[in-house]
Image (cartoon, rainbow, N blue to C red):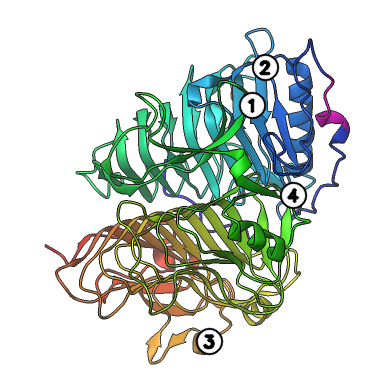
Amino acid sequence: MTNQPPHRRTGRLLALGAVLALTAAMTVSVIAGTAAAAPARPGGGPGDLGPNVTVFDPGMPVADIQAALDAAHATQVDNEMGTQRFAFLFKPGTYGSAQHPLQVKVGYYTEIAGLGASPTDVVIHGKVEVYNRCLDDGGTSNCLALVNFWRTLSNLSIDIDAAGQDGCRSTANFWAVSQAVSMRRLNITGGTLSLMDYCTAGPQFASGGFIADSRLPAVINGSQQQWLTRNSEIGSWSNGVWNQVFAGVAGAPDDAAFPNPPYTTLATTPVSREKPYLFLDSRGGYNVRVPAARTNTSGVSWGAGMTAGRTVPLADFFVATPRDDAKEINKQLARGRNLLLTPGVYDIDRSIEVKRPDTVVLGLGHPTLTAVRGATPIDIADVPGVIVAGVTVDAGLQESPVLLRVGKRGGHGHGSPRNPTTLSDVYFRVGGPHIGKTDTALEVDSDDVLIDHTWVWRADHGVENLTDTQRWNTNTGRYGAVINGDHVTATGLFVEHFQRYNTVWNGEGGTTILYQNELPYDPPTQADWMNGDVEGFAGYKVGDRVRTHALYGAGVYVFNRNNPDIHTENGFEVPERPGVRLHHIMTVNLNAGTIDHVVNGLGDPADTTRVGVPVYVADYPVP
């Protein structure tokens, strides 16, 4: 595959599809004594998972399951900035057959997950797919995957069966996605997994992505600009575009020829913890498995039995819906309960305060916490073992100081390397569905924190109908991720479009494995994009006092569409110390603006004479 996309889509948004009523499709009658697949009622008891969660039973007719999932996809396929959220959960068993395969399409804000203790307990005989989205001419042209965000697939097996699909569609299970999409705890057999959709108007642009704890067949990377695969097993990997990273992956390609192909391969992952997941025990009770943190590991966590960790009954969780405000949530947390956020959009007018060690905050179906009156929606104390997973945090109309904070500024020191506070699939937005303002999106002040896949996004498009100059002055976000704690690890750190430093790393002993950044598209003038006397802000900044830091597989991209004459001096800026090491980094021009150097004055310009062609530095300092 040749080097890819000039830039992310910049044209008008396709009008959002009308919201379809799902109640009839989801409320399936009892079949031969099995439980009905209907939205669970809100509450705290086992099985009460909220009004937007549907639980399927293997005794149900495949046609009924297919109809419910098709109705959800019709609602969500174009609902990029909408408020609907859904989770579809599958009890242990097999769904679909050679005669009637179950073929699922996954739209925005949709989670598909198995309820088994192992991914092999739930088998979908068919496919689970995401195709290119066609944005123009009534959904017939401008087909790409660059805005296929916010969806989740986890904890099940897919036995690929394309029966009934056309010749091209039958060649693979397609997962054509970009940021804020995760694949976890999967066992895929019977065919090929393609991370691009080469059937809808041919191979098109894609900007993912993340896979963890999965056993996969042959994988076609195709047009994916960057991708992180962690702690998995793969049959093979087809190619790279700009930045494909593997950590602890059996079958990963060798990276000795970097940058051709542009692979970065680590034999093990230095620190990892798998995301918590719902499962049913032998008596049909709902539980949450909370995996233990691990060091220097490779391969899947479930290959030799149940993933190591602890089991927490769902009865120990407060099951929240958007009707529950932060005051009620905090009351429940203070009583020692964990928190399960069911699908929906929550208005948060004061911080959700997570103070107790080992508290679990788990989202289903992409729940979104929107800051109200300048609140910080999530504030985690400087304690070990807290886990926040599967949550999106949105800036609101009034500026917040920060959207999610771990620890207290200047007071870190109570973290645990054996039990790190962990953020898994936690996403941030400033603008997009509405006006948003924050000083900083993510701030980590505690030591020994693990960030396992995040997208921190100041929106480059949305429904606010703003010009770029208006967006620069309205949807304000100065810093994306600010890391002040020591020994913080990030696996899959995606940060985009902030107005000063996208990422500032001030803590000692930090590690990032795959970093993806786009500088802001919208500075009106060079004067608006100055760091004192320096032109622009680096996309990744390691603090001047830091003595040890490691970065593996990183890219900073530029597309100054509002003013193509703007320059940024360096993509990366780090202190000149032997303990600060960058491995396999690059800058690339997406058709406007210039990054003059890759790192600290080293590397050629990424300018419009080499659109889509990265400027690589294999190691810094240079050996």
Gap between marks 2 and 3 measured at Cα: 58 Å
Q: Amino acid at mark 2?
A: Pro
| Residue 620 to residue 77: above or below | below
Q: Secondary structure at mark 3?
A: helix
Mark 2 lies on residue? 58
What is the C-alpha distance between the residues marked 1 and 3?
A: 51 Å
Q: Quadrant of the C terminus?
A: bottom left
Q: Is residue 26 magenta?
A: yes
Q: Nearer the viewer, mark 4 or mark 2?
A: 2
Placement of 181 over or under 47, stated as above or below: below
Quarter holding residue 266: top left
Kind of residue sitting beneath label 4:
Asn
Q: Residues within 10 Å of mark 1 (few under 14, many from 20)?
A: many
Label 1 with label 4: CB-CB less than 8 Å: no
**Amino acid type indicated by mark 3:** Asp
> In the image, which disc is placed on residue 90?
1
CA gap between label 4 and label 2 equals 29 Å
Residue 470 appears at what percent x and percent y?
69, 79
Report which residue position mark 4 lands on: 79
Q: Is residue 606 left or right of residue 207?
A: left
Circle 3 residue: 528
Q: Real-space Cα distance between discs 1 and 4?
A: 24 Å
Element at label 2 = loop
The x, y position of residue 197, in whole percent, is 57, 36
Mark toward the start of the polypeptide (2 vs 3): 2
